Image (tube, grey):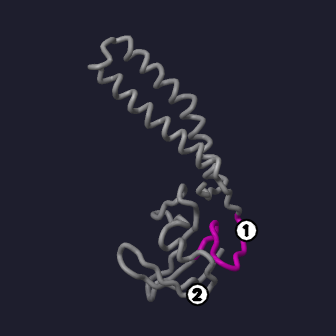
Amino acid sequence: MHTQYLTKEGKQELRDEHEHLTTTVRLEIAKRLKAAIEMGDLSENAEYAATKEEQGFIEGRIQEIEYILANAVIIEKKGDYDFVAVGAKVTIQEDDSPEEMYHLVGSQEADPGNGRISNESPIGRALLGKKIGATVQVETPGGKINFKILRIE
């Protein structure tokens, strides 16, 4: 089993998506399949083939969500952190660059463009367990970077 870190909000979003897929979307696909079958000759029925493909995708996503929820560990907001952990907001600075703040979350909720990085990303892995004032070196796709941890919230 692979632990899936989620915020309470992230877990609720997945539950909502699961509910929508297993009720509304499954029903819509079933109706479309029935209509396509009624057209006859399934071997040359593009609507039937496309709907079956979509059904497979939806069922795969449902299984993925169920796996994530079954293995989820909820990230509790602590407030004060002695070291970087999943759930912490970390302010770092690379050399003379402006400060950057990242919220360390599980991979399901990562959104680097909005400051949410995965604990499994190169920077996320490098930050875990480090304390304020630590200098961290990270191998990224763009090369090695060094930065200092300024704050942990």
The quarter of the displayed image where residue 43 is located:
top left
Q: Is residue 42 above or below residue 68?
A: above
Left or right placement of residue 117 versus residue 15 in this view? left
Please name the residue shown 43% across and 16% down the image: 34
Q: Is residue 102 above or below residue 54?
A: below
Which residue sits furthest left? 44
Q: Is residue 147 above or below residue 61?
A: below
Residue 57 spot, x, y in % from top left: 44, 37
**Magenta region, residue range:** 77-90
Q: Nearer the viewer, residue 43 or 79?
A: 43
The numbered mark, 2 or 1, whose residue comes first in the sequence reads: 1
Q: Is residue 127 above or below residue 146?
A: above
The quarter of the displayed image where residue 37 is located:
top left
Give the alpha-carbon distance from disc 2 to disc 1, as whole Å: 21 Å
Say whether residue 8 is magenta: no
Q: Which residue is mark 1?
A: 78
Where, quadrant-wise, is the C terminus in this rendering?
A: bottom right
Amino acid type shown at disc 1: Lys
Q: Which residue is mark 2?
A: 134
Please name the residue shown 50% across and 30% down the image: 25
The quarter of the displayed image where residue 39 is located:
top left
